[in-house]
Amino acid sequence: MALRHLAPHSTLLRISHLNGILSAKKRFFSVSASMASPARKVLVPIANGTEPMEAVITIDVLRRSGADVTVASVEKQLPVDAGHGVKIVADALISDCGDGGFDLITLPGGMPGASNLRDCAILESLVKKQAADGRLYSAVCASPAVALGPWGVLKGLKATCYPSFMEQLAPCATAVESRVQLDGMVVTSRGPGTTMEFAVALIEQLYGKEKANEVSGPLVMRSNHGDEYTVRELNPVEWTFNDCPKILVPIANGTEEMEAVMIIDILRRAKANVVVASVEDKLEILASRKVKLVADVLLDDATNHSFDLIVLPGGLGGAQAFANSEKLVNLLKKQREINRPYGAICASPALVLEPHGLLKGKKATAFPALCNKLSDQSEVENRVVVDGTLITSRGPGTSMDFALAIVEKLFGRQKALELAKTMLFVHP
């Protein structure tokens, strides 16, 4: 029986391979046997050079399902220098995870992150045991080809990976071009732009389709995966800067980590000078789904500088911390007064910009459940709204659209689409 891959217009996997059906049924009945099913144990290894979007989206989405996710560093220390200057602090060292017993081990990609994962003997042993025991394992981007393939755990199975690694994958697996691919107990995917679909597919395998739908709804994901992103723009003005745009991204305890990391990563890919500033009294923050991120500076150190753009990620706790930060609010008010661009996503338009008068006379959008807090709700159904020097967006699933819209305003649509295709957010 042929294995069908994920259809471009579907969020979730359609499993037709016999092994896939049988294992899915087995998991379904085991989940259904108890209404209060125990939390599934998941291991997400990270390394220096890991692609931060792939790691953080996977961790965040899986934790939303109730999974017990351990973020494990394969380095000698808990902090890792992920790609694009993003610093993540792991929960544990991989050496402390040797007893296994995981329902899923899932590898993010990124280079040299994938190579660093491959070279970790403890991780190799864990994944090989996972495969031998018939438990779920998965990888995205470079890692199917760079790690899973050489470990021999893709033999005779269909798998996908980042396009430039397909040749490397071919001798180790049946290489296919699906955005997300399931065969037996392995799930693989292609890149940053497919990672949210990948993570939701993992929830379906762990908990069933109902839970996957329950988690994916509030993410505000696209239904038309791979299509070009769209932006609603009103009162268009040119966003100008000298040489290289300097962008401030504040973070706080309770910040939505997916939104923060996608904004930072994508803007740095576009070669913007992104300054990540903690509004707390230390650089390390604990984000909304318990991912630990490390800022570049404290907000105090950023207040004396001028920025071409200030952009706020969401997350309920983070947005409240922003709203309570007099220094940040003053920076935003000054930005508006001098007609410089500023923006926010998810909870932040409703909880930070609106109460401080920063949406006055402007069209905006926000997280769907908070749109009733906006005084003007006429454009809230749009995924991204640009009104002159203001840009707003809806949630984790619109964060790539949002970051790409910023790239488009600063560098042009061609540059934004190039990035979107490189990340596999838009079909190459």
Image (tube, rainbow, N blue to C red):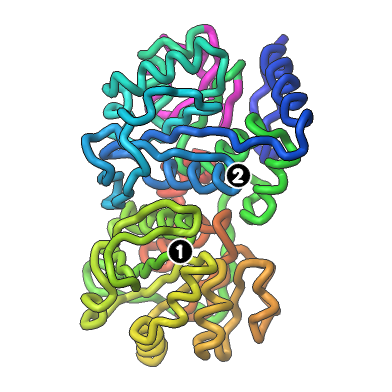
Q: Residues within 10 Å of mark 2 (few under 14, many from 20)?
A: some
Residue 345 percent across, percent down from the top left: 52, 68
Q: Is residue 93 left or right of residue 220?
A: left
**Tag 1: residue type?**
Thr
**Tag 2: residue type?**
Gly
Quick one: 134 or 366, which is closer to the camera?
134
Q: Which residues are magenta?
A: 156-182
**Depicted 149 relative to depicted 202: above or below:** above
Quick one: 12 or 229, which is closer to the camera?
12
Q: Is residue 17 left or right of residue 123?
A: right
Which residue has dot 2 on it? 66
- Marks 2, 1: nearer the viewer: 2
Which residue has dot 1 on it? 255
Q: Is residue 16 left or right of residue 78?
A: right
Q: Earlier in the sequence, mark 2 or mark 1?
A: 2
| Residue plotted at (23% across, 74% down) | 242
